[in-house]
Amino acid sequence: MAGEMRMRGAIETERLRLRPWTDADAPALFELAREPELGYGAGWQPHRSVEESLTVIQTVLGAPHTYAVELRVPSADGEPAGTLVGAVGLMGPDASDLAFDAGEYEIGYWTGKPFWGRGYAPEAAGALMGAAQRELGARAIWLGYYAGNERSAHVAKKLGFRAVRVRRGVDVPLLGERRDEVDNLLALLSPEGRRALVLLAARDDPARHLCTSESVRLGRADVLMADEQLGVLARFAGKGAYLASPFSAAGARAMGERIEPGAVVSLDDAALAGELAPGAEVWPYDGWVYEAAEPPAEVGAPLEMRPLTVEDTDAVDAQYALMDRDGVEDHLRRGWVIGGYDGEGRLVGFIGEHHEASMGMLEVFPWARRHGYATTIEAAQIRAMLEADRIPFCQVAPDNEASQALQRRLGLRRIGQTQCWLHKPET
């Protein structure tokens, strides 16, 4: 959690210094935060007095990992060193509605209007993210900005963030309105993580390894092994499931020695299950991947697609039997489930994604079946993933002929190697 660790001292860049806020910053903060255009874009009311700015410093900006951004050296425009130019900060899972797992943080930043266009925001944000990776073990950074905020969009792109979704009608409590929010993600890969992606991309059919490679690429999993001969082993944050991509029987055995008894494992070659975990209970599946650059041409019956929220937990939980209620609520909180609504505003079905970044949870309510809605819903998910520079792929049970036919109809390719999930025996 963000409050459990603190980074050491100030953070310096070529032009800037990031340091903790003090009460003495109130007058300078007021001069910047009184600007209406700044506050409106960030979602808060312009400050009305130095006293209000002082209160904000004491109640908001004093949080862990929140910094005043000042000039470290005089600017080219003549402002002296020590001039306050903006703010930057991180929030962990305890304070953010985007970061959920250990090692995830949400970043926020702003610079005063007199300093727009000088590159101070990406310089400060980049420095803070680098420090978070070194000192806090951060592996993924989230960034949300309101749709239409082109300055924030430009900074996000410059920093390497990728848009992963748009949330419609998000509350802006300080302004009493709702806005659409663009959520962006940047995975801070370790050297082992970068090596793992290179190794997996070099395989004969990289699509076989998507559960591992996409989880690593999205910052959802930590790499435990990345060996040219043995393969890649990763694990979800905390004590989650393992993701095993062995390149040989020897690699599967080596991974099995590192995976504790009782663990759940995604294995991208079911033929190696006996090598990795002798006697394991195995659930085989076929992998399917969408490889076209454009979304499917066939979209089925028209529906309005929009993200579901925790308020839809009952509806999703009643229809989807392969996950417990806590899991359903977790997926909804993360924004991983979208629903389709017919012309009468009725929810007819939904689809989501799983921790390993695969499409899943596709369900159409019984009363709404045989209208082509499944095609529409999955096509919408494929489109959303392509827009976010994601690779749409899914896992289908070998005996699920209806789902296999749907994947063919939408233009997905069946991955040749049978894959599986398995449960390593306790002893």
Image: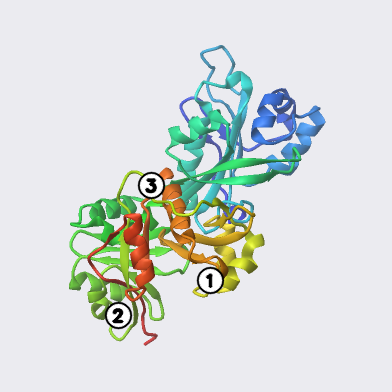
Please report the residue visible at 48 percent of the width from the left and 65 percent of the height from the top.
370
Q: Position of residue 88 (x, y in %)?
A: 58, 36
Residue type pointed to by label 2:
Ala
- Asked if the residues shown at circle 2 and circle 1 are in contact, with their CB atoms under 8 angstroms apart, the answer is no
* Residue 228 rendering spot, x and y as whole percentages: 19, 59
Which of pointers 1 and 3 lies earlier in the amino acid sequence? Answer: 3
Q: Residue 344 vs residue 255: left or right?
A: right
SS category of the residue bearing label 3: loop
User: Looking at the image, can residue 168 be seen?
Assistant: yes
**Could you tell me which quadrant the C terminus lies in?**
bottom left
Looking at the image, is mark 2 or mark 1 nearer the viewer?
A: 1
Badges 3 and 2: C-beta atoms under 8 Å apart? no
Residue at (58, 55) in percent of width and height:
342
- Give the mark count: 3
Q: Which mark is residue 75?
A: none
17 vs 233: above or below: above
SS assignment at label 2: loop
Residue drawn at (18%, 69%) of the image:
248
Q: Which residue is mark 2?
A: 277
Q: Quadrant of residue 316?
A: bottom right
Circle nearer the viewer, 3 or 2 = 3
Identify the image's colour scheme: rainbow, by chain, secondary structure or one colour: rainbow
Marks 3/2: CA–CA distance: 39 Å
**Rendered image quadrant of residue 200:** bottom left
Instruction: Judge the density around disc 2: few (<14), some (14-19), many (≥20) Cα neighbours within 10 Å.
Output: many
Q: Between tags 1 and 3, which lies in front?
A: 3
Question: Which disc, if any, is residue 320?
Answer: 1
Q: CA distance from mark 2 to mark 1?
A: 29 Å
Tell which circle, 3 or 2, labels the residue nearer the N-terminal end.
Answer: 2
Q: Which residue is mark 3?
A: 295
